[in-house]
């Protein structure tokens, strides 16, 4: 049986590890040719090499997504390699959790540059490449954009902004057949999360989720796959919570 993305071409940012890698590998398994993009190109190339070794088609690209020209060049390289761009996943994020009083201008600039500007440039470049009509853009947001927590002012604000970008882009690009949606995860068991959060905090997060666990990267990748696929052909402008029910849970 053909995969969900058979014959499609996808570009995934921040795809050398964690959630981005899981998305890139799942998209390949479902038939897509995948451009794996990361700030560190050798990491991206290693992931792409693994996809190729497994029988897929992939290239590894290096770019700082806060740089508009670099994103445009990565999209152009993807089209040159595979002949089209059908799916864009804006996943890259640089993050630091800290109290409001400790936030410095360079932290704001870097986080917003990657997490907000990078999504703007990704949408812009992808829409240009999809000018012939049709395509899917999937932005990776967060439940942090809807729920408050300490030390997350910048992260929450940026992810709330991503939801706004999704809604506005869906209206403007809809007449061209381009769908734009957000996946909004809660805590995901990535290498980065495990490095930042203590075992005690992770354990507490598990108990806070009605489903009794935190998300695995595959949970979020499957949601991104659905939004990228033709099965979601009439879905646009939405922010899909993949949160184990925590968004509806009241905790004492």
Image (cartoon, rainbow, N blue to C red):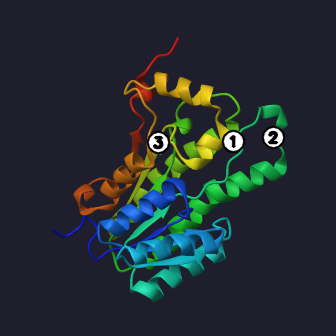
> Are circles 3 and 2 on residues that touch, CB within 8 Å?
no
Q: Residue 52 appears at what percent x and percent y?
A: 41, 78
Residue under the image location 49 percent in, 61 percent down: 21
> Are circles 2 and 1 on residues that touch, CB within 8 Å?
yes
Which residue appears farthest toward the left when viewing the image?
A: 1
Would you place residue 19 above or below residue 194 in this image? below
Residue 154's mark? 1
Marks 3 and 2, the one that precedes in the sequence: 2
Q: Secondary structure at mark 2?
A: loop
Q: Secondary structure at mark 1?
A: helix
Would you place residue 42 above or below residue 251 in this image? below
Tell me the quarter of the picture where residue 31 sits. bottom left
Marks 2 and 1, the one that precedes in the sequence: 2
Q: Which residue is mark 2?
A: 103
Q: Label 2, label 1: how many angstroms apart (C-alpha)?
A: 9 Å
Q: Which residue is mark 3?
A: 185
Q: Residue 182 appears at what percent x and percent y?
A: 44, 50
Residue 197's mark? none
For disc 2, the neighbor class at 10 Å (few under 14, some 14 to 19, many from 20) is some
Residue under the image location 56 percent in, 60 percent down: 119
For disc 3, the neighbor class at 10 Å (few under 14, some 14 to 19, many from 20) is many
Marks 3 and 1, the one that precedes in the sequence: 1
Residue under the image location 69 percent in, 36 percent down: 153
In this view of the protein, which residue sits in the foreground, 15 or 107? 15
Q: Label 3, label 2: how many angstroms apart (C-alpha)?
A: 24 Å
């Amino acid at each position: 049986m053909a995969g969900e993305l058979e014959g499609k071409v996808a570009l995934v940012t921040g795809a050398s590890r964690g959630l981005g890698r899981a998305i890139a590998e799942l998209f390949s398994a479902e038939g897509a040719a995948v451009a794996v993009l990361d700030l560190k190109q050798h990491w991206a190339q290693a992931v792409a090499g693994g996809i190729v070794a497994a029988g897929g088609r992939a290239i590894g690209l290096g770019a700082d997504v806060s740089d508009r020209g670099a994103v445009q060049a990565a999209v152009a390289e993807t089209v040159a390699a595979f002949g089209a761009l059908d799916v864009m996943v804006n996943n890259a994020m640089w993050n630091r959790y800290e109290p409001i009083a400790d936030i410095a201008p360079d932290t704001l600039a870097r986080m917003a540059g990657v997490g907000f500007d990078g999504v703007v440039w990704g949408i812009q470049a992808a829409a240009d490449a999809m000018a012939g009509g049709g395509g899917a853009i999937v932005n990776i947001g967060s439940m942090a954009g809807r729920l408050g927590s300490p030390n997350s002012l910048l992260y929450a604000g940026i992810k709330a902004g991503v939801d706004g970008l999704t809604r506005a882009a869906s209206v403007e690009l809809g007449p061209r057949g381009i769908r734009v949606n957000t996946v909004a995860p809660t805590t995901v068991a990535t290498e980065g999360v495990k490095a930042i959060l203590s075992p005690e905090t992770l354990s507490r997060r598990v108990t806070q989720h009605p489903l009794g666990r935190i998300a695995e990267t595959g949970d979020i990748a499957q949601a991104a796959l659905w939004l990228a696929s033709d099965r979601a052909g009439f879905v646009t402008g939405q922010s899909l919570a993949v949160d184990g029910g925590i968004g509806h849970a009241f905790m004492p």
